[in-house]
Image (tube, rainbow, N blue to C red):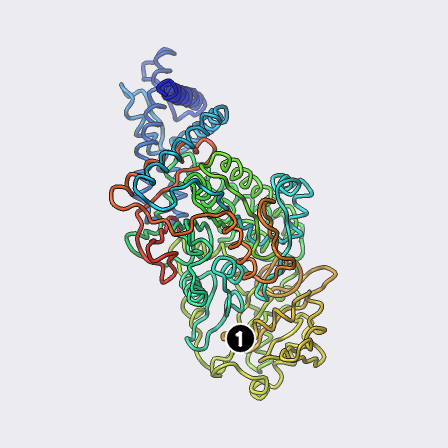
Amino acid sequence: MWRGRWRTAGSALVRVILVWAVSTLTMLALAGILPDFRLRSGDGDSVTEIGLTAAWGAGAFGLLSALVWPVLVRALLLVPALVLGLLVFFLNGSLLLLALSLIPSGRGEVAPETAVVVAAVMSAVASATSTALAVRDDEAYRRRLYRLADRRRRRTRHEGAPGTGPSAPGLVFIQLDGVGYETLRQAAGSALMPTVAGWLDGSHHITPWRTDWSSQTGASQLGILHGSNHDVPAFRWYEKDTGEVVVCNRPTSAAELQRRAVARTGDGGLLTLDGASRGNLFSGGADQLALVLSVSARRGRANRSRAGYFAYFCDPANAVRTALSFVAEAAREIGQSLRARLREERPRVSRGGLYPLIRAFATVVERDVVVAAVIGDMLAGRAAIYADLVAYDEVAHHSGPHGRDTDRVLARLDRSLALIARVAEHAPREYRIVLLSDHGQSPGETFLGRYGLTLKDLVRAGCGLPVSRRAGRTRSGAEARAAVLAALHRPVEEGARAHPERGPDPVVLASGNLGLISFPDVRGRASRERIEGAHPALLATLANHPGIGFLLVDGEVLGPGGAVARLDEPGAAQELLARFGPGAEQAVRRTDAFPHVADVMVNSAYDPLTGSVHAFEEQIGSHGGLGGEQGRPFLMWPAELSEPEPDLVGAEAVHEVLRRWLREADGPQVPVDPPAGEAAAGEAPVVEAAVAEAAPLGAPPVEEPPSGGGNGGSLPSARVSARDEIR
């Protein structure tokens, strides 16, 4: 036993010395290259003295990075995430200046602007060296993880907590937001996603499933995580009883939708028992939360808005790498947008303004933090983990579902999956990885781009109301925009957008290629007769427009040429809706029964030959209604789990499948209480040590902040407080 400990300590010491040596050489090289950086006195020094100066500076910088950097990041928890990312370089450069000031005889000197570059390079080199050394010592790494996990189990058993028996297999659910069934199959078949291709060739099975009429993340993920998406007719809709526009990616709306789902099902959610929710709109009842929108509006000491980012950014190498990747991704988007404009590609939407930063946040920052959190969850041995990676969905909205832009995103997502699978081999319990998506993406020119007016303009014209001569644009409702605004503490569609004035003017909203029209001055749902009496030309104008496929008005489906079918007559609407795919009538009938369905629901036209639709938002890859691949996501599971039922329909059905798989894994049967008092404090070093060992593989530490705070009636258990780790 003692021999093994001495061997482990010796191996760790050798790694530290090697990293120190490489950092010293890096500092010497940079001092020789950069004119504003020197490691010698004014009188000149020998080679030995210069080498000792570099070693001293590299050692001081490494020590400060290990000790001072976490304190600096924690002190800046209230700084918005994007601002923190920009501060990374300056904080790192300041540490280097401090380290050089500690060198005896004042030999180290560097200009402040050069210090930023030197610190970034040294952090990146140190991280790469640590990774290379860890890869060569996988067995020691594996033994260390299992020893830490065993120590945690012994302490838990000593405290008499539940779940002290052998760990059953855990489940990791990775949601590839917006990736349709056919898109994934093509990416795997073309070697674009080799990790997914390898799973499909051996260990996993895959099947498509059909979304509800509202084929968007809010409806799908609420149904998957909480078992009910009842009364979610679209991405955004107007509720007459409150006069409010509910938007799935607004934090307050997401919290209310989660509360309604929990009240309807009487259950906390899919992740109630020892679960973690990462990067999602909803918590799923988990007590470990990171970047979960439904809790991001909470305030309080236990819910500091930036608390969970500490888990990732406390490692300066992670911070520098993510910040550099962020800048590179923003530059890449600007270049791709400029190329599309010069080539006059069609269809095309505006990609200027803040969009390059939003795309970089979704494809770099959010991806890195979510993947890091998932890795930490596996190393901590949690039973159920659900994470959403939104990168593809965000890029597809603006670049289209297929092409070079989205191919690169899919390739990077595959590398993230490979990293998760590799870390799972070192976790203290077996993990089964399930991939799924919430919807797909349908291509097509926007309604505005094709016909020169928005749906709102068309509705106002049909109502005989004045229409602006300049066609306005409908803001995209992509989830990443809301995540960025939440990170910046900015409201999402507040003010007039959230509370339209009551009056005769219709409220017109868009959700991909699904439009919603409500009349605030009409109590309850307006009948067809009431609408035609007030606006005789409106319904005919909409139904006969070439860009519109069909309307739903108070239990009736209206099509072009005066076609009408009542939903209370079985099969009557089947022919009218046949071109929109199997199950279209069933999906429309279900939405028609929702209490908050709009007075008029509008689905755009759909071309079965090209699979294209016309989004009422500024999106050339869209989802939200019926038509094409947007309604055909996928579910991919390991062969050890039971086969799902054929022809899965609706997110609620997917929830039941995932529930069954959790039961098959025979996970904890009761919620696990967090240790109290000193026991809770005593567990943190174990988790931190386990994650510290994982750092060489690219997994940052996972913070275990103090529990506390409620989640608005959606707690996983009356005895477990939800932890808001990252928002």
Amino acid type, label 1 = Ala
Q: Is residue 31 visible?
A: no
Residue ID at (40%, 63%): 252
587 and 128: which is toward the camera: 587
471 and 487: which is toward the camera: 487
Question: Is disc 1 surrounded by few (<14), some (14 to 19) or many (20+) residues within 10 Å?
Answer: many
203 to the left or right of 575: left
Q: Secondary structure at mark 1?
A: loop
Q: Which quarter of the rendering shows the N terminus? A: top left
Q: Position of residue 552 (x, y in %)?
A: 61, 76
336 and 617: which is toward the camera: 617
Residue 203 figure quarter: top right
Residue ID at (55%, 47%): 434
Q: Position of residue 19 (x, y in %)?
A: 41, 23
Vertical relation: 726 (above or below) 522: above
Q: Give the farthest residue toward the right.
A: 609
Vertical relation: 410 (above or below) 14: below
Vertical relation: 98 (above or below) 514: above
Q: Is residue 306 visible?
A: yes
Q: Position of residue 172 (x, y in %)?
A: 50, 46
461 to the left or right of 91: right
Q: Which residue carries the number 1 mark?
A: 598
Number of labels in the image equals 1
Residue 576 figure quarter: bottom right
Q: Position of residue 681 (x, y in %)?
A: 28, 41
Q: Give the farthest residue toward the bottom.
A: 533
